[in-house]
Image: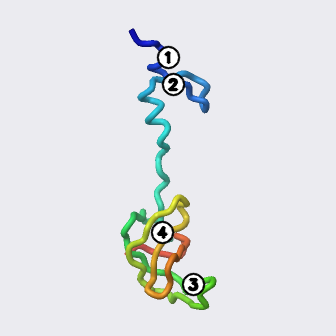
Amino acid sequence: MTDAHEDYVYDEASGEWVPAGQAAAAAEPDAVPVRDAAGTVLADGDSVTLIKDLKVKGANQTLKQGTVIKSIRLTADPEEIDCRHESIKGLVLRTEFVRKR
C-alpha cells in the first residue's frame, strides 16, 4: 500500500498539493522565443545579418552593417545571442541589431 503523500507534491507557488505528474510539467516553464529585429524567431545554428554598424568593446573593431554571422547560439537571455566571428571570439550580440538570413 502506498502513502497518499507520495502521489502528490506541494506546489509553493500556488500553495496547493498537486499530482506528481502535474508538478513535473509545471516545473518546466514555457521558453520565451528569441526574436530578431524583424520579429522572426531565431534558433541555435541560424545565420544572421547585422542591421547596423556595431563597435565591439575591447576589440577596437567595428562590425559593418550586412556582416553575416553564422551558427549562432541562444543564451538564457532572450535579448542576447552568442556567436563567433573570424576575428572576434566570444561575441555576444543583442537581438535588436540582427536579422535572420
Secondary structure beneath dot 2 equals strand
Q: Which residue is mark 1?
A: 5
Secondary structure beneath dot 3 equals strand
**Placement of 74 over or under 10, stated as above or below:** below
**Placement of 3 over or under 30, stated as above or below:** above
Amino acid type, mark 4: Asp
Amino acid type, mark 1: His
Distance in Å between CA atoms under marks 3 and 1: 56 Å
Amino acid type, mark 2: Val
Distance in Å between CA atoms under marks 4 and 1: 46 Å
Q: Earlier in the sequence, mark 3 or mark 1?
A: 1
Q: Which residue is mark 3?
A: 54
**Placement of 7 over or under 24, stated as above or below:** above
Distance in Å between CA atoms under marks 3 and 2: 49 Å
Q: Earlier in the sequence, mark 3 or mark 2?
A: 2
Q: Which residue is mark 4?
A: 36
Which marked residue is nearer to the observer: mark 3 or mark 1? Answer: 1
Q: Earlier in the sequence, mark 4 or mark 1?
A: 1
Q: Which residue is mark 2?
A: 9
